[in-house]
Amino acid sequence: MSEFLNDNMFSKYSSYIYDQSGIRFSESNRSILESRLKERLRQQEISKVEDYFSMILKDQGETKNFLDSITTNLTRFFRNQAHYDTFINYVIPDIVKYKRSRGENNITLWSAGCSTGEEPYTNAMVLTEHLPADMNFTITGSDLSLKSLMKAQMGFYQTNSTRNIPANYLAKYFDEKDKGYQVKDDLKKNIKFDYHNLKFDSGLRNVDILFCRNVLIYFDEAAQKEVIDQFWKVMNNYSYLFIGHSESLFGMETSFEFIKTDWACLYGKR
């Protein structure tokens, strides 16, 4: 048992985190919670975990900061190429065909759990390159981490973060500056970044394509089901859902249709 975080306080913190976000901390990742807690206590100049727990119960602003501190923000441009092969060769042509059949010309994409913005910017580049000239798109990138969203909004990335971007895309959509690359305003104009806790309704509706990759792994089955049900509610009647390659809706009671393409698997709402 840790002297810093005893079993009783670990139980209280993990229950509170779960109630607030759906993220489940167990013994296997207890050390992560402890290290993030130590940092928050140091920043707030508080010595006891009991006192900090009392603080977050009373202060929603600090609860947001705390949840921000415990999230893991791992992402990169063009993450999982098989998903992008599917996006380009299967999803985009099919959605364009559907939209045209209804006399519509705008595609709405939501990147949920977007971290520092690499995924929404990747999606924006792909849509700009592969949509017909008469089709428009809007992208919402959301995350639980305000710190990550601020970086995403800024759109500046160190050179080593851009290594997966094809050279022609890098030249077209970024300006080189200060040992890194800045996203051009022309790409930014179709993207909105917004704070959102997946445990609650996002307010979005009629989403055509939803990316939520490597987020569900942090939730238990009940919380995963809540999130997937929320996604069903916000998505268009003809739409596509990408989740992480190690994630699955198998065994979950859901109306999403499993779709296997030549490149990767995804889900559809019909």
Image (cartoon, helix red, strand yellow):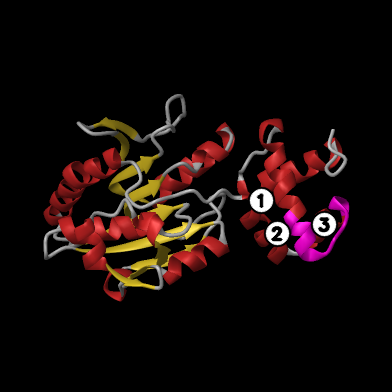
Tell me where residue 250 appears, x and y as whole percent: 42, 26
Label 3: few (<14), some (14–19) or many (≥20) C-alpha neighbours in 10 Å: some
Query: Helix or strand or loop: what does disc 1 sit on?
Result: helix
Q: Is residue 265 left or right of residue 143?
A: left
> Looking at the image, which residue is at 73% across and 42% down?
14
> Looking at the image, which residue is at 34% across and 43% down?
241
Return the residue at label 2: 63
Provide the residue span drawn in magenta. 39-50
Return the residue at label 1: 20
Residue 41 shown in magenta: yes
Label 1: few (<14), some (14–19) or many (≥20) C-alpha neighbours in 10 Å: some
Circle 1/circle 2 CB separation < 8 Å: yes
Mark 2 or mark 3, which is nearer to you? 3
Q: Nearer the viewer, residue 13 or 49?
A: 49
Q: Is residue 16 left or right of residue 243?
A: right
Return the residue at label 3: 52
Q: Is residue 205 visible?
A: no
Query: Helix or strand or loop: what does disc 2 sit on?
Result: helix
Principal secondary structure, stretch drawn in magenta: helix
Tell me where residue 215 appears, x and y as whole percent: 49, 43
Q: Nearer the viewer, residue 136 or 84?
A: 84
Which residue is most to the top? 251
Circle 1/circle 3 CB separation < 8 Å: no
Q: Is residue 45 left or right of residue 191?
A: right
Q: Earlier in the sequence, mark 1 or mark 2?
A: 1
